[in-house]
Image (cartoon, rainbow, N blue to C red):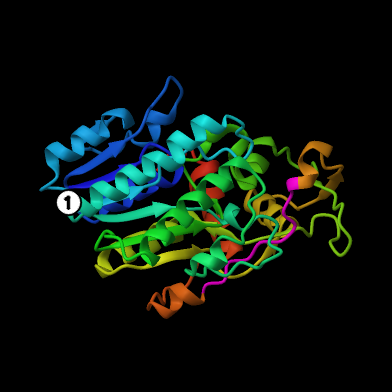
Amino acid sequence: MIIVTGGAGFIGSNLVAALEARGEGRIVVSDWLGAQTKWRNLAKHPLFDIVAPEALPDFIETHKSDIRTIYHLGAISETTAVDGDLILQRNFHSSIALWHACVRHRIAFIYASSAATYGDGALGFEDSNDLHEARKLRPLNLYGWSKWLFDCWVLARIAAGDPAPHVWAGLRFFNVYGPNEYHKGAMQSLVSKIVAAHTPGAAVKLFKSHKEGFADGEQLRDFIHVDDIVAVMLWLAARQMPGGILNVGTGTARSFADLAKAAVSACGDTPRLDFIDMPESIRPAYQYYTCADMRRLRALGYNQEFISLEAGVTSYVQDYLLAADKFR
């Protein structure tokens, strides 16, 4: 049995699809479906069960001898979230409880951290597993802080020699795009937003730069297709060894202008860009550059090439966003 928390969400539902394609017969999703269209992320995939997050601890205890792996992707992921108590409960304390359950029952534990732990990037993007170095990071928002808090908690347990799951990894995802993100609203990738708003011949509006050294539209991100994220998670679980905290990006920074041009070209149109002022409210926490240092994952033996920005965006747009059925 495999449990995917947040399994009805963006990354989680893509992982569920991949697990089913590999022939995994007993897949359990732990998530809330709500009253929107989030259920459609799972509509094509028979599941062993769907368990509400508050019922998951009892479910684990009941099925403890059957559970092989927990992929913990469930969290409040909005970078604009402001309810500190709720974030602490959902993103930190629930993660601690799952860690302990995996230790007790010898269950592999792969969890989602975030590149938001790196803050403004002033200290670089190296996924050091040294607790002292990790504690120096300063996330810019509540979501990033909650992920950093759990990363530090994990590294403190490892440094103290406390019991850990026999297989574990914490994955700092960079800018992920791909199918099944439509329920995320304003938190969808820019690819999805561009295609949804696109009118043939119209210019794509991007934020102006408000930082010296960056031209308008040349703010840089490490954009990674969700298929690459899933491939890394499956590979780490199959290793049956601890992986530690790891960056998961492509290792290449590309501009928002590059992304926009790829999205419009995939729609069969000639890219045109226009630039608008960035809202004052987001300027203090805005990242102008992110790029994953991928040396640790590569050193573990992961040698699969990552999907290029142009290939990934084209596939996403043409196979999903412009299709009659855009769900995986």
Q: Is residue 127 visible?
A: yes
Residue located 79% across and 41% down the image: 202
Q: Does the stretch in magenta take in 189? A: no
**In-image side of 166 versus 53 (left or right):** left
Q: Nearer the viewer, residue 102 or 322?
A: 102
> Between 259 and 32, which is closer to the camera in this rendering?
32
**In this view of the protein, can residue 205 be seen by the observer?**
no
Q: Residues within 10 Å of mark 1 (few under 14, many from 20)?
A: some
Amino acid found under the numbered disc labelled 1: His
**Helix, strand, or loop for circle 1?**
helix
Report which quarter residue 175 is drawn in: bottom right
Say whether residue 288 is magenta. yes
Q: Is residue 315 left or right of residue 44?
A: right
Q: Residue beneath label 1, please?
A: 105
**Residue 294, horizontal then vertical, whole percent:** 52, 72
Q: Residue at x 56, y 48 (%)?
A: 317
How many marks overall?
A: 1
Magenta residue span = 285-294
Residue 239 locus on image (x, y percent):
27, 70
What is the x, y in percent for residue 205? 79, 43
Specify the quadrant of the image occupied by residue 163.
bottom left
Prevalent SS, magenta region? loop
x and y percentages locating residue 145 in the rendered image: 57, 47
Q: Residue at x 71, y 50 (%)?
A: 269
**Left or right for 251, reference 98:** right
